[in-house]
Amino acid sequence: MTALQVVRTVEGLREALAPARRDGRVVGLVPTMGFLHAGHLSLIEAARERSDVVVMSLFVNPTQFGEGEDLDSYPRDEDRDVTLAAEAGADIVFAPSAEEVYPAGFSTHVEVEGLTDVLCGDPSRRGASHFRGVTTVVAKLLNMADPDLVFFGQKDAQQAIVIRRMARDLDFRAEVVVMPTVRERDGLALSSRNAYLDASERERATAISRALETARSSTASGVDGALDAARAILADAGIEPEYLEARYADDLASARSFNGRPVLVAVAARVGRARLIDNVVINPEQDTTDTRLFRDKVAHRTPADN
Ligand code: AMP
């Protein structure tokens, strides 16, 4: 493919992909809500490496936002996103309208049970309906683009786990690839919502990744000890987390020790008006399991104005 194409309809997307499909080329899909940063770009670059045709979807999905969340104020800049996506190696940006994705009378949803009512899905937090919105739109995107590969970030660990389960349970043929979290040099995980932080909030927000690293280095104190040590770092920065929990990375059951299966230590916290999430996976068998999922990396490229 040559110049990047922006398409806005499912029909247009299928037409654009038809030649690749006919020739049996590998299609990679990177779903995003836009306002791209180096985390998104790392997914596009990974897709570029492994696919012949790279599609990035750009859709701020209304059904995954709850009442009172930031749907209306969510940062958007399509022109900039298209430029950055092209530079990172995307061939097609699929940027549908809400009406294209959810036509009048839309009434079908995809729900993954069990994994979606803890952490962010806890009824007192975003609730399972958040993940219902995510899985429904991702299922639709997989049907629209029918990719061979679909790329997600470890930054949204629960989302990646839920989507892996959905893809397996519903026999989607796409391979779900999860890429490491991209961080600023001071540890802050890149997020479109970091745009909400002023300078002092941005500084305080670094406590989130420091807390997670503290948990990682405190495993000798057991789960409760490690979480207490992490909580102390957050408290020092005046951050009261919405949650800070240790759960087994495969089924999200509450973790009782670090001695067995890989443990996801996940945090959500409000800093100013930004609700930020981050996580680390503590893997007792680092050498023998798939560490691709679990290794974070520092941004090698951050768009200047992000
Ligand atoms: P979003 O636009 O926030 O829906 O994110 C789109 C994709 O980018 C999701 O798969 C996210 O997990 C991934 N992503 C977001 N932030 C990062 C990050 N800092 N590092 C790696 N992937 C990320």
Image (tube, rainbow, N blue to C red):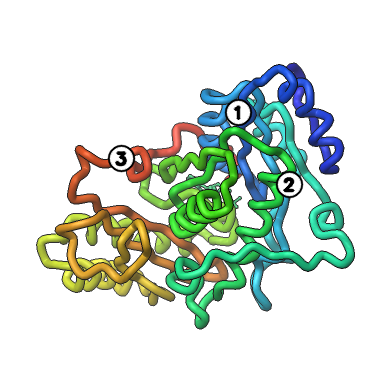
Determine whether the residue tagged by mark 2 lies in a helix, strand or loop.
loop
Which residue is at 49% across, 55% downward?
Answer: 165
Quadrant of residue 184 within the rendered picture: top left
Determine whether the residue tagged by mark 3 lies in a helix, strand or loop.
helix
Expressed as whole percent of the image width and height from the top left, the position of residue 113 reads 51, 69
Depth check, front residue: 304 or 191: 191
Residue behind mark 2? 77
- The alpha-carbon separation of the residues under discs 1 and 2 comes to 16 Å
Q: Is mark 1 within 8 Å of ligand 1?
A: no
Q: Residue furthest bottom?
A: 124
As drawn, is 71 to the left or to the right of 276?
A: right
Instruction: Please identify, in this view, whether the residue under mark 1 or under mark 2 is nearer the observer.
Output: 1
Mark 2 or mark 3: name the one nearer the start of the chain: 2
Relative height, residue 292 to residue 187 (above, below): above
Residue behind mark 1? 88
Which residue is at 30% across, 71% downward?
Answer: 254
Number of marks in picture: 3
Depth check, front residue: 180 or 170: 170
- The alpha-carbon separation of the residues under discs 3 and 1 comes to 24 Å
Which residue is at 43% across, 70% downward?
Answer: 119
Relative height, residue 93 to residue 113 (above, below): above
As drawn, is 299 to the left or to the right of 56?
A: left
Quadrant of residue 129 within the rendered picture: bottom right
Depth check, front residue: 68 or 135: 135
Residue behind mark 3? 291
Instruction: Please identify, in this view, whether the residue under mark 2 or under mark 3 is nearer the observer.
Output: 3
Quarter of the figure with the N terminus: top right
Mark 1 or mark 2: name the one nearer the start of the chain: 2
Q: Are marks 2 and 3 in contact (CB under 8 Å)?
A: no
Expressed as whole percent of the image width and height from the top left, the position of residue 132 reads 62, 66
Q: Are marks 3 and 1 in contact (CB under 8 Å)?
A: no
Check disc 1 and give the amino acid type. Ala
